[in-house]
Amino acid sequence: MNAIDAKFMRLATDSAPGQEVRQHAGDIRNLFRGGELPGTPVDFSHGDVDAFEPTPGSFKAFAEGVEIGGAQAYTEYRGSGGIRTLLAPRLAAFTGADVSADQGLIVTPGTQGALFLAVASTVAAGDRVAIVQPDYFANRKLVDFMGGEIVPVRLDYLGCDDRAGLDLGQLEDAFRSGVKVFLFSNPNNPAGVVYSGDEIRQIARLAERYGVFVIVDQLYSRLLYAGSDYTHLRAQDIDPDKVVTIMGPSKTESLSGYRLGVAFGSPRVIERMEKLQAIVSLRAAGYSQAVLQTWFAEPEGWMAERIVLHQAIRDALLERLRAVEGLGVRTPQAGSYLFPQLPPLDVSFADFVRLLRHQASVTVTPGTEFGPHSSASIRFNFSQDRQAAVDAIGRVAELVSRYRSE
Amino acid sequence: MNAIDAKFMRLATDSAPGQEVRQHAGDIRNLFRGGELPGTPVDFSHGDVDAFEPTPGSFKAFAEGVEIGGAQAYTEYRGSGGIRTLLAPRLAAFTGADVSADQGLIVTPGTQGALFLAVASTVAAGDRVAIVQPDYFANRKLVDFMGGEIVPVRLDYLGCDDRAGLDLGQLEDAFRSGVKVFLFSNPNNPAGVVYSGDEIRQIARLAERYGVFVIVDQLYSRLLYAGSDYTHLRAQDIDPDKVVTIMGPSKTESLSGYRLGVAFGSPRVIERMEKLQAIVSLRAAGYSQAVLQTWFAEPEGWMAERIVLHQAIRDALLERLRAVEGLGVRTPQAGSYLFPQLPPLDVSFADFVRLLRHQASVTVTPGTEFGPHSSASIRFNFSQDRQAAVDAIGRVAELVSRYRSE
């Protein structure tokens, strides 16, 4: 196999969220214990934007963008100057540190676009990059695609409840070994845990000490549950030219269909990201950019209500999951992911994920997508219709009992 | 300078179309001969979608996509199955060879997205890639970013009028030297010339003989002027697993604000492109994908009228350009680009482009963007308001006369 074949082999997307439709059922029925479980199909691989609808006014903002015409269709590669001028102070207020609309902010096609550009702008072939395990599946693939070398750092999220559980000793060892870039999501995707103030300050201190560039994916940082604190890395004691923060309105705000994300921070890296965006996709869709006017400017109380509704679903699902003997799960402090660890089963976890889909009409993302030590875990995005989700978790519990190792 | 700094230095976008707003005027006024030329500013760096509006029904299709909700927001990475099923037979009919909706077609964020994915899926570090000079500026940058080695092939578009002018001997030499991939645009961007049937068949023959993979960017192939023939490479005698064709509705159909493109052909490469899209941008904006329903299904006569209107502008501008002594320009057979070669001037061509912008309110793209031998040429996208464009060309002619070398 030549180098490019091997590279694409490692980019496998067969189990990625949303790609399940391309899988063949194969002979999974041969493994069935008992019959199919009836119920409303639930796709936990992503949020249901029909259950939690896009931000009020978002479509109107898009329509107005189309009306504007050419000026909205053809923006600078880094996004419309007017939109950046509007967003920069909102992002600064949210994160607690200045954002330069002209030099330090880029609009991208989704946060995925921002992640790709940030990694490709900082990681060269052979560079060592620290990656948390478990963390968002694309982080590892992006580093691999750029020819970087992954240095794993453990997140013991099940072993504590007052912090995310990052192994700071291992992080320092990694940094000391010559890591150039540290990439992580906060809250962690898939576990939903938020890094404590102390953890974030330690990350800042170590990055300063070892000269490491940090990319922090804060996609879910607005959906923060009661009793949780959030610490923004970029507002800590850290060189502002060594941090890029990534956010976007695809999740909490349900605007995924418009493909919008932003990256802000280091002007040097933002400039590279724009150069690269010019050859990767030119720009985020011009008309879609207009939708960002609604971001951080939602109607009074709208976000608070969205948080309360998600928290209620979280708690209802946790109650049912915790009734399953031998299952381990931590309460997420932000975002809409649950990442339970299953008890030992008589089938492989990969087959169990297929059984969930074909026997119980429940689609989940296997833990192996998030790291090599998470094969016993499955990820649920619980931004769903509440009753349908609760019923679906009941079917998951029933299948666990059918396939459990005695 | 380290490797990644150098890589981004070569990705300079300062003179790229649409980025002029980031340039500083500097001391250009010191070079002025005579005063400013008044007139409606014209930005020839891209088409004016206010002069040529998006396809009828495109916004309605988008709005219906938003109404569909989650199913339209979250498609497979390669794009909605329903949209692909609709498009495949239309693309097959247009190009004269089968397209597999399931295995051989991907929807991307613009044709730029398709180009990036196609190059990144076929070019590994060290691979030799044949690139036409002049050709679309991103072609060269994409190969460079992937670490490929560019093998230039000359297009003598000014030296003939019965074919595009590709140096087929040089192409064969390039292929014989171990080129893995050949990437070119047809019609050529910037020159607007269409490859003859004989040139396309020779490309197919040489690609077969030397096992070269061909990526052909046919973005402008629908805007074909009276008296011109177009030959689709993929319909020739060539291994269908060794060709990817790229198109999109951003130009002729003025749908750039939605960011839509497609690539179709080799299932092996389309599959790689999907894997890569998963980490680069996930998918083309879901709601935007719905707009592709209008593509190749425009109202009766709409495309024919659009072609006639563009041809009239082309001819009006050519008449004025040809009145400028010493200026060389070939009649474009398709698309909306004119690429005249200027006579010798007393200022550098780079300064002349800045003078056009600051003294005459005319924005053009310098020829250096398209290849190292085109510094005396400038590119105009003439998809503009006709009168404004004609007046602007008058100002260009006036400035040529002011700065001409005697």
Image (cartoon, coloured by chain):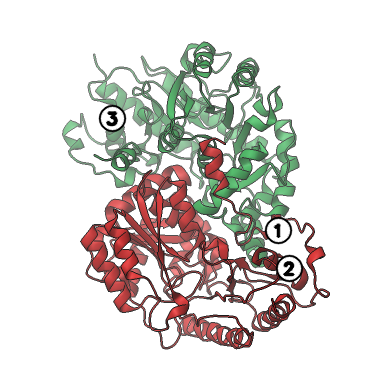
Chain colours: A red, B green
Drawn side of residue A397 relative to residue B34, left or right: right
Q: Nearer the viewer, mark 2 or mark 1?
A: 2
Q: Nearer the viewer, residue B353 or A148?
A: A148
Q: CA distance from mark 2 to mark 1?
A: 14 Å
**Circle 1 residues within 10 Å: few <14, some 14–19, many ≥20:** few
| Amino acid carrying mark 2 in the image | Leu
* N-terminal-most mark, 2 or 1: 1
| Quarter containing the N terminus of chain A | top right
Q: Say whether marks 3 and 1 touch (CB < 8 Å).
A: no
| Amino acid carrying mark 1 in the image | Val
- Which residue is under mark 1? A21
Task: Point out residue A212 in the picture as x, y percentages from the top left corner.
Answer: 28, 57
Q: CA distance from mark 2 to mark 3?
A: 64 Å
Which chain's residue wears label 3? B
Q: Nearer the viewer, residue B224 or A404?
A: A404
Identify the residue at horizontal 67%, vertical 45% (top origin): B295
Identify the residue at horizontal 51%, vertical 62% (top origin): A371
Drawn side of residue B333 relative to residue A217, left or right: right
Please give the label number shown on residue A29.
none
Q: Say whether marks 2 and 1 touch (CB < 8 Å).
A: no
Does residue A396 appear in this view?
yes
SS at mark 1?
A: helix
SS at mark 2?
A: helix
| Quarter containing the C terminus of chain A | bottom right
Which chain's residue wears label 1? A
- Which residue is under mark 3? B350
| Amino acid carrying mark 3 in the image | Ala
Q: Are marks 2 and 1 on the same chain?
A: yes
- Which residue is under mark 2? A355
Which chain's residue wears label 2? A
Identify the residue at horizontal 61%, vertical 27% (top origin): B225
